[in-house]
Image (cartoon, rainbow, N blue to C red):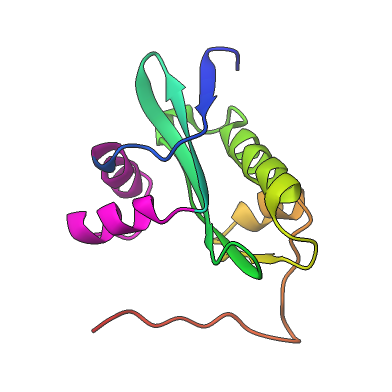
Amino acid sequence: MSDYSIVSTPPDLEDYLRLREATGLSSKTVEAARIGLSNSWFAIHVVHAGKTVGMGRIIGDGGCFFQVVDIAALPNHQGRGLGKRIMAALMEYFEAHAPESAYISLIADGKAKDLYAQFGFKPTAPASIGMWRKKS
């Protein structure tokens, strides 16, 4: 794992779009990605041999509410603990910089819930249920 570096900035726009596509995350327009990346509360990317191979971000209002998004590692780099390193970096920053009463959430796809549980995330159901809507 020493040949991977965590960089405490968002990936560049092209790498962000490439990582989303390569890892099966939903596609985003260039305009949406540019705006979104610039409004990250905290973001990291993972570099291996000079290339961005992973990323993760926290978005939110900076005080009350935060959300973990864009956790991704290229398929040929998965299974090496990158997801855990990405989450550890994000949660370390959150714990150090978010106010005491801050709430952080995420949407867990598939088995990713097992990774997130290692960082104290719990299902909201049955007390609440995640919902979503996409601009039409």
- Image coords of residue 30 (percent x, y): 19, 54
Q: Which range is magenta?
A: 14-40
Question: Is 43 left or right of 2, judged from the image as shown?
Answer: left
- Image quadrant containing the N terminus: top right
- Asked whether 6 or 96 is in front, the reply is 96
Position above or below: 30 against 2: below
- Image coords of residue 79 (percent x, y): 57, 32
Residue at coordinates 33% horizontally, 60% vertically from top-left? 26
- Asked whether 46 or 64 is in front, the reply is 64
Residue at coordinates 52% horizontally, 21% vertically from top-left? 5
Residue at coordinates 39% horizontally, 13% vertically from top-left? 49
- Image quadrant containing the C terminus: bottom left
Residue at coordinates 62% horizontally, 31% vertically from top-left? 81
- Image coords of residue 102 (percent x, y): 72, 66
Magenta includes 23?
A: yes
Magenta includes 43?
A: no
